[in-house]
Amino acid sequence: MATIAVGILVLWFALSVVAQVSDRCLRTLRRYDVLGLIPAYNFFAPTPGTLDYHILVRDLSSDGELTGWRELPYLPSTPWAFVWNPGRRHNKAIFDVMKDLAAWINELGPDKASIYLSTPYLTVLDHVSALPRAEAATKTQFLLMSSRRRQGAGVDVAPVFLSALHPLI
Amino acid sequence: MTADQYLVLTEQLVAVAVVISCLEYLVRPGVLSDHGLAGWPVGRLTRRWKTGPWGAVLDAILVPSRYRIVLLLRCGAAVMLLVPWTEPVPRVAALAIVVVSSLLAQVRSSYGHDGADQMCLVVGGAALVARIALVTEAALWFIALQACLAYATAGLKKAASPVWRSGEALPGVLGTTIYGNARAHRTLVRHPGIARLGCFSVIAIETAFPLALIGLAPVTCVLLALGVAFHASTVILMGLNTFFWAFTATYPAIVYVALAR
């Protein structure tokens, strides 16, 4: 029993080391790591996330008019975030979805339509489709933007991805 | 202190991270709801096996209403770990709940997790193996080596990055909404020398961290103190509250491996 247990720990550590060697090693291992046991320790490296991501939504009404864009807000931080920071999970999820979508876009082959069945696309589409709406809408569309605080004052904003218009059921 | 007492301390520290994390999810469950960004209806589509023969079992556990019960159980198990039980059975049960619920969280969705969740799984998993197979010393070695691997990987990858070496990384990260701090961002933008010093300090602490295991008490103590200071600063500036507990949970194992054996 003890030998098997030590063997498990040795194997787990060895795979953890291999996973840190390169992104390719990590991706290969994670393909088989269905339970998420292999860690990735490259916190904020090599390129740290210095962008803010934003999800904007607009709808197509039944009379064919497009609404203006509205941004889905980040959950606010509290002055006690150093001990209690419940909004960070939602905010981190926005960041993760955007990073995942950017990776999909970079790796898209000639069949660009595959993005529409990707996990990040479906995640955002499902999320924005279920948002409460003041007025009846027939279709919805989302826009993903990035922004970066300038070294001086102001913010640089750039579009990342515009979705198709999807029917609302 | 015995190896078992070091392991108990490690379990208690990681339990604090688990309790905070569970309560944060329970207070703001929107992200886990069916249409949340970490929702199960899309999460279940990410791998074929989640909708195969296991699908019905996972569906039964991971729908939001039942997953809240999983989170409550996880929170309760972590509270149990905070109590220094002498009987091994309650600790094994509590650790098993913490580890299985960590795995379920990974299966449910890959969005919204962070490095602290990852370290909780690594530490909790090793502690569970130690308790079941009575291999406390091996588990403490495993935890200490994982911590050193984590810091060294993060440090070396930062050292290879022009963004970190130029000093632009810290003001950039602190300028974001989710990890930002407006005052610290402004200060570092105004004083690029301080920003560069900060970046190199992070690289130096992380890269040098494995030296904590060489067995020289002053070196180990200085590196662990720097580690605590580093995590305290990320808590205050970036709101990485559970990182502090998850990573300092590995420090008793490092002390045991480096100094106490």
Image: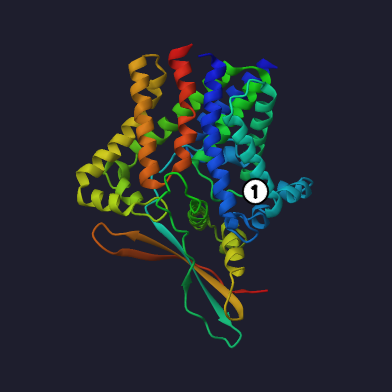
Above or below, A117 against B166 in this view is below
Residue at horizontal 58%, vertical 48%? Answer: B110
Above or below, B6 against B248 in this view is above
Q: Mark 1 points at which residue?
A: B108
> Would residue B258 appear left or right of B187 to someone viewing this image?
right
Above or below, B234 against B126 in this view is below
Where is residue A149? Give x, y as percent: 32, 59
Classed neighbour count for the residue bearing mark 1: other residues with Cα under 10 Å, few (<14), some (14–19), many (≥20): many
Where is residue A105? Give x, y as percent: 50, 58
Residue at horizontal 44%, vertical 60%? Answer: A53
Q: Quadrant of residue B216?
A: top left
Residue at horizontal 40%, vertical 24%? Answer: B210
Q: In which quarter of the image is residue B125?
A: top right
> Would residue B211 appear left or right of A66 to someone viewing this image?
left
Closest to the observer, B258 or A9: B258
Point out the image quarter for the N terminus of chain A.
top right
Residue at horizontal 59%, vertical 26%? Answer: B126
Where is residue B115? Give x, y as percent: 49, 40
Above or below, B217 against B114 in this view is above
Q: Is residue A162 visible?
A: yes
Provide the secondary structure element on which disc 1 rests. helix
Closest to the observer, A33 or A115: A33
Label 1 amino acid? Arg
Q: Residue furthest top?
A: B261
Q: In which quarter of the image is residue B154?
A: top left
